[in-house]
Amino acid sequence: MSSAAFALSHNFVAAAGEGFTPPGLGEFIFQPYFSDGTLPWLTKPLVASVFAAVVVMVFFLVGSRQRALVPGRFQFAVESVYTFVRNGIARDVIGHGFEKYVPYLVTAFAFIAVSNLFGVIPGIQFPTLARLGFPLALALFSWAIYLGIGIKRAGFFGYFKSVMFPPGLPVFIYPLLAPIELIQVLLIRPFSLALRLTANMFAGHILLLLFTLGGTYMLFNESVLLKVLAPFALASAVGLTSFEAFIQVLQAYIFTLLSALYIAEAMSEEH
């Protein structure tokens, strides 16, 4: 049973007299599909994440085979996503030499967008990237890429020297600046990428559950006033669903844009 379905049934019981219990951290905890404990890691978020990867792969494979001079709707959609990331993010942000990073950026954008949109798709109704482990893995990919670029360009010690001791500053600043810059490159950037994405998906999912389950509770409550107000809460849930879908795609864009910015910085001669 999904977290939304469990919470819905729970609140139907609450309507009978226990009072409304708002959604919380329990909505992000899933039991394994196999109760005998043989595959404890096989849960809904993992399956949804694999499904998102398959959707992205099929989307681009099928779209790339349809190379009509006048593209149909599906080919146009695939080309639009690719062109948007290639020209609007990779080329504009990275500049010279951006081509080699386009496959990663396009894949990251598409995978994050699909995984996030699962939160508003009936039958799934859970954004997999609301679980920190998934965004952290993506952030580590971006971190490894821009760190690898910097080390390849300037060498291991040369890169970290340029990061920790940028030229043109007073000498007495370096003891304070050097550890801050090192922590930023090694820890803050990957964790900030992951936490920003997770926090937005977490908050959006909680908000949608709150209005949906709260409106349902009000609709089946004995109070006439709550029954009257219930349609407004449910209508708000519908409006928030559209807004959340926009935020979900926006967060995919922000993650990809920041990754491109870090790559561009690592490729530059000076920091």
Image: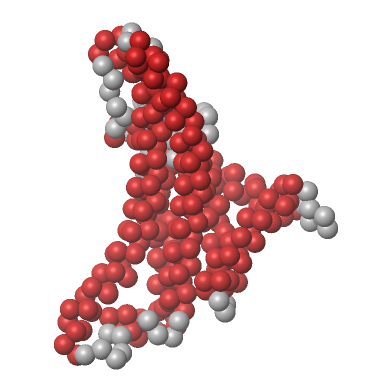
- Location of the N terminus (image quadrant): top left
Q: Residue furthest right?
A: 69
Rendered location of residue 226, percent (x, y): 35, 16
Does residue 166 appear left or right of residue 113 in this picture?
left
Q: Residue at x 25, y 13 (%)?
A: 18
Q: Is residue 170 visible?
A: yes
Q: Answer with the quarter of the image where residue 192 lies.
A: bottom left
Q: Nearer the viewer, residue 83 or 106?
A: 83
In this view, 130 is above or below 185: above
Q: Is residue 1 visible?
A: no
Q: Nearer the viewer, residue 96 or 136?
A: 96
**Could you tell me how many numbered marks the image carries?**
0
Rendered location of residue 202, percent (x, y): 36, 42
Does residue 226 appear left or right of residue 252 in this picture?
left
Rendered location of residue 43, percent (x, y): 41, 34
Q: Which colour assignment does the render follow?
A: secondary structure
- Location of the C terminus (image quadrant): bottom left
Q: Residue at x 58, y 45 (%)?
A: 54
In this view, 20 is above or below 160: above
Q: Residue at x 32, y 70 (%)?
A: 185
Rendered location of residue 213, percent (x, y): 38, 24
Q: Residue at x 53, y 55 (%)?
A: 109
In this view, 234 is above or below 94: above
